[in-house]
Structure formats: C-alpha cells, structure tokens
Amino acid sequence: NAGVTQTPKFQVLKTGQSMTLQCAQDMNHNSMYWYRQDPGMGLRLIYYSASEGTTDKGEVPNGYNVSRLNKREFSLRLESAAPSQTSVYFCASSESGGASYGYTFGSGTRLTVV
Amino acid sequence: SQQGEEDPQALSIQEGENATMNCSYKTSINNLQWYRQNSGRGLVHLILIRSNEREKHSGRLRVTLDTSKKSSSLLITASRAADTASYFCATDSYSSASKIIFGSGTRLSIRP
C-alpha cells in the first residue's frame, strides 16, 4: 500500500552511539517532516523539508541532522545519542508545506538510549 | 512552544454518546487539522478546516472553527469502541506557513 515507510521500527542505542533513521514515501509528496513524541505528549517538530533540496529546523533540532536524499527519502541522524533522545520518532509527508494538505505518517521508530 | 492546546486532556464516555474536544491556539492561522492516533500507531489525518470556514463535516465528525476566539472543536457523534484513541489538533501560522505544530492531545476512551 502507498504510504510512508520508516526503518527500523525499534532500536536500542548506548549513550554516544550514532544511528540514522530512514524514511521513504511513495506518494510523490513534496514536503517531509520528522517529529518526536514523548510519553503522553503531542508531537514536536525536529526538522522538515518543504521541498527537495531544502531543510529547515523545527522546534527541537539540537542533537539531530537530516538529509533530503531525493524526493522520496528523508533521513534523520543522531550523531551522539543521549538518554534524552529516547522517544518515538515519526516521519510524515504532505503534498506541500503547511496545513493546506493532510499529512501522512509512518508507523514510527521506537528508540531507547541507555 | 505549542501552537494548539486540546481540552480536556482525557475524556471517558459511554458508547453511543457524543464526544466533544476543544483546541485553542495562539496566533492567526491559515488552516487547522485534526488527527487521530490509536495506541502505538502513527497519526491519521481526519479533517482539515480553512480559516475562512466555520464548520465542516465528515461522516460522524463535525469540526467548527472560531477564528475570533482562536479555537476549534471536534465532535464525534454516536461514539463507538473503535473511536478510542488520542486526538490532536494541528495548525500552521501566518509567520510560519510551511509547517504545522501539534497540540498535546485529548485521550478519548469509549466505555462499552
């Protein structure tokens, strides 16, 4: 089925390790986003890419980097993981930026940093 | 900082009753969206309402928007057990139209 695919679904890291979360969409959407969700809370925007070739910081970008590899793929990298980065990470895409179109979300990556 | 805040934080109702959730936001917007999240899953887009619209319907969902009060409500009529989920509002803003910010959500439980 068409949608947003995130890998991996689960990951445990030791403090200081690095990893890349992968996200791919097959809906030909222009805009892609990375959010984190902490227990009992809403989503906070980490980084977004309004269109291929552009990336911008969201609310909580510290400790993360992103790459918009092509129109389909948007990866999130943790260079030196910290326990505060334990969270569920969601990738989303939309036809264009802002709230003019609904966002399609992936199923999430559950990351634990010990 | 959060643009939208939902109220109540948690709501428990009997199956068949109507559920109403509210969202307040801080700055002028272009559009407002509502999403549902089932436990352990990603968010699903429910409905979008534009700043020049006052009410919108989709099946058992009714959304209202009052830009003068900077608030929106989501009404789910004739609730079902499958409606048990968290519901989030999300808004853009005039100053940052290229992204949306989510509220902290309302946890809705439907009792059989």
Image (tube, rainbow, N blue to C red):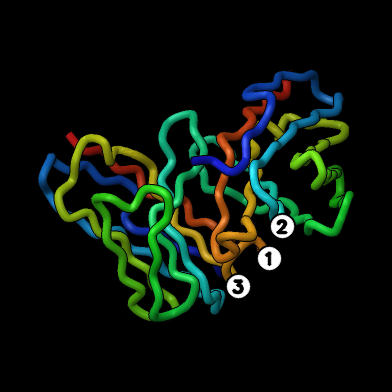
Q: Position of residue B103 (x, y in %)?
A: 58, 39
Does residue B63 appear in the picture of this structure? no
- Type of amino acid under label 2: Asn
SS type, badge 1: loop
Mark 2 vs mark 1, CA separation in Å? 6 Å
Mark 2 vs mark 3, CA separation in Å? 15 Å
SS type, badge 3: loop
Q: Position of residue A45 (x, y in %)?
A: 45, 51
For label 1, the residue is A100
For label 3, the residue is A95
Please give the chain letter of the residue carrying mark 3.
Answer: A
Say left or right for B100 vs B54.
left
- Image quarter in which the C terminus of chain B is found: top right
Figure quadrant of residue B17: top right
- Type of amino acid under label 3: Glu
Crowd around label 1: few <14 · some 14–19 · many ≥20 (10 Å): many
Does residue A105 appear in the picture of this structure? yes
